[in-house]
Image: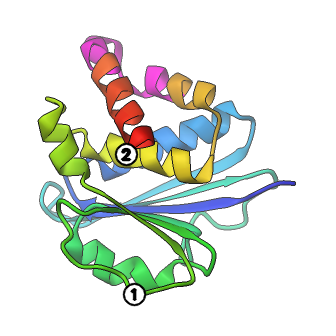
């Protein structure tokens, strides 16, 4: 049985929203799926709004826009408020509860609260809360295989930043176990 994943990552610029989406897209590509990756951000970049639509499918994708995601990763409160009602019934929402004090009262979706920013700080992984959330998304949805997710890390982390590979792997693991 095939499963299409229409994932929306959203937060502030500088939180790694686009990078998380890129990793998810490459993981889908390594699983031989059809993929799209569509970044969207305000003109101010760092500190402004940023979101990223990722579609992973067994069949060709008609549009790269994710209006009604079946998976949503919220990295800040404005994004949480803006997109929480767009998740399709039966979908999954992953929330950085360190950054988002609000709760969602929807009962028709799987909501997972992860203190990702706090976990990143406690594990000396400053700036990797996005990867912790990606790990949790992987654990909750199985949007790709573990091998493909690791290949995506190898692809997306440039050689000059190879020292970041192991911290990213650690952040994924923490997310999976959170």
Disc with the residue nearer the chain's start (2 vs 1): 1
Q: Secondary structure at mark 2?
A: loop
List the single residue furthest toward the right. Answer: 1
Q: Is residue 156 located in the magenta-colored stretch of the structure?
A: yes
Occupied quadrant, residue 75: bottom left
Quadrant of the drawing holding the C terminus = top left
Main secondary structure of the magenta stretch: helix
* Residue situated in front as seen by the camera: 145 or 118: 118
Residue 130's disc is none
95 left or right of 34 in image? left
| Residue beneath the point at 33% across and 82% down | 82
- For disc 2, the marked residue is 178
126 left or right of 115 in image? left
Residue 21's place in the image compared with 40, above or below, is: above
Occupied quadrant, residue 45: bottom left
100 left or right of 41 in image? left
Q: Looking at the picture, how far across and down is residue 154, in whole percent?
A: 46, 20
| Residue beneath the point at 55% across and 44% down | 25
- For disc 1, the marked residue is 105
Q: Is residue 120 visible?
A: yes
């Amino acid at each position: 049985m095939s499963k299409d994943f229409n994932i929306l990552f959203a937060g502030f610029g500088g939180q790694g929203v686009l990078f998380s989406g890129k990793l998810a897209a490459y993981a889908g590509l390594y699983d031989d799926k059809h993929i799209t990756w569509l970044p969207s951000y305000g003109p101010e970049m760092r500190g402004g709004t940023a979101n990223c639509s990722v579609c992973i499918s067994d069949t060709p994708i008609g549009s790269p826009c994710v209006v009604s995601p079946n998976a949503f990763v919220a990295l800040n409160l404005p994004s949480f408020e803006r997109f929480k009602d767009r998740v399709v019934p039966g979908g999954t929402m992953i929330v950085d509860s360190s950054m988002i004090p609000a709760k969602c009262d929807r009962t028709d979706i799987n909501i997972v609260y992860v203190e990702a920013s706090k976990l990143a700080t406690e594990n000396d992984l400053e700036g990797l809360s996005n990867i912790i959330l990606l790990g949790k998304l992987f654990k909750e949805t199985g949007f790709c295989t573990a091998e493909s997710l690791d290949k995506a890390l190898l692809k997306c982390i440039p050689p000059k930043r190879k020292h970041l590979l192991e911290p990213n792997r650690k952040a994924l693991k923490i997310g999976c176990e959170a």
